[in-house]
Amino acid sequence: MGTADAIAFGMRDLRRTLATIVLSAPMVGCVTPLSGHSQTCPDIDKGETDDTFAIDHDDATLATVVAKCEQQNDCHDLCDALYVMKYGLNNAVFDTCELVSTGGEHLHVVAHLECVGGRRPGNYRRGIGDVTCNAVGRFLADQADLEAASVRAFADVYADLVELGAPADIRRAVIRAAADEVRHAHVCARLARRYGATAVLRRSSPAPRRSLHAFAIDNAIEGCVRETFGAAVAGYQARSAGDPIVRRAMYRIARDEAKHAALAWRIQRWLLRRLGADDRRTMLAASTAARTELSTTMLVRDPTLVQTLGLPAPAAATAMLAELDTRVWSPLAWRA
């Protein structure tokens, strides 16, 4: 791929590539247990969706981490130990782990998995979310919020493209993508209600117009990296979600997100013809950093998200990222 035309991923080509990546990723309906563990996921049918653990102070193996949690207010090691004991999950990542009193000491785990799929506007900040519901409802509410924010992101993209003199057909495709995100936000909000969460679809303010270079970096990160990976994740969910309603919803969303990713690569081709060598290098560095960030922020925090929503467990996420790196994100693909 020695020319800018080499990154012109058409809709059909990109969809075929993403389908191949999704189908080749390990199918993990639940987290694989460690040796000696029989339970691999919480029992959704019995309502076991809260990450709350009773602490056994008489368990000698937990004594050190319990003491650290109580004395230093640092419960992450205790979270790790309890997840290994209960689910055999030894690579979970948590946002917050804290002791709460519910007639005895329990450990409550707050774990937000970063959503991908929609573009983030420049001023996007993740909302607090509905902390009263279970992890599945929280994730879907967060996803609905991101999809709603993506409408503003595409409005900003459209304004930048007008300012930069982009072709009319690209601008029209951006308008259609914004309409897709409106539908995605409402679909995810309905799914969140299905799991007891209320999605707050916030409105974002318009962002200032960006320079050609700044816009290229944003498009590389939000479109070529995040939306491309988001399309793969949605495709994986359409294949593996335990909830059939989620599977059907993600099938439609995956098709749209693949279309948005192809649009991002189309925009990038147009931009590369106008960027100098130094600007291309900084854009590549930013996209590489974004790919690296995905490898940590997309680790599964809660096995219920794997079982119910079909989000890729660490083995599947790692495999898809590696395939995307080889097939789509190769540094050769960014050269003009």
Image: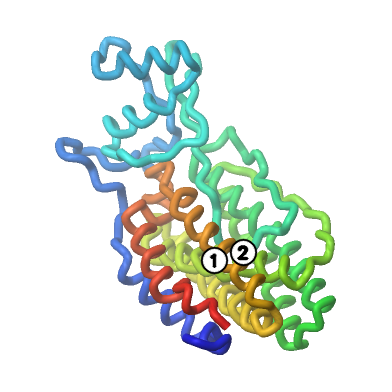
Decide if residue 247 is in sight here. Answer: yes
**Which residue shows up at 32% across the image and 15% down it?**
64
Whether residues under marks 2 and 1 lie with C-beta atoms below 8 angstroms apart, the answer is: yes
Q: Amino acid at mark 2?
A: Glu
Question: Residue at horizontal 47%, vertical 22%?
Answer: 74
Mark 1: which secondary structure? helix
Task: Measure the C-alpha gap from mark 2 to mark 1.
Answer: 6 Å
In the displayed structure image, the side of residue 214 where residue 164 appears, left or right: right
Q: Is residue 249 visible?
A: no
Q: Position of residue 8 (x, y in %)?
A: 55, 85
> In this rendering, is residue 68 above or below 224?
above
**x and y, in percent, of residue 196 in the image:** 56, 42
Helix, strand or loop under label 2? helix
Task: Please rate how many residues cluster around mark 2, counting C-alpha atoms within 10 Å: few if below 14, some from 14 to 19, many from 20.
Answer: many
Instruction: Find the residue positioned furthest to the left.
Output: 36
Residue denoted by label 2 = 222
Residue bearing mark 1? 225
* The furthest residue to the front: 278
- Whole-percent x, y for residue 54 in the image: 37, 20
Give the colour scheme of this rendering. rainbow
Q: Is disc 1 surrounded by few (<14), some (14 to 19) or many (20+) residues within 10 Å?
A: many
- Left or right placement of residue 210 versus residue 1 in this view: right
Q: Residue at x 49, y 60 (%)?
A: 291
Q: Quadrant of residue 163?
A: bottom right
Q: Residue at x 60, y 48 (%)?
A: 141
Report the front residue among 197 and 208: 208
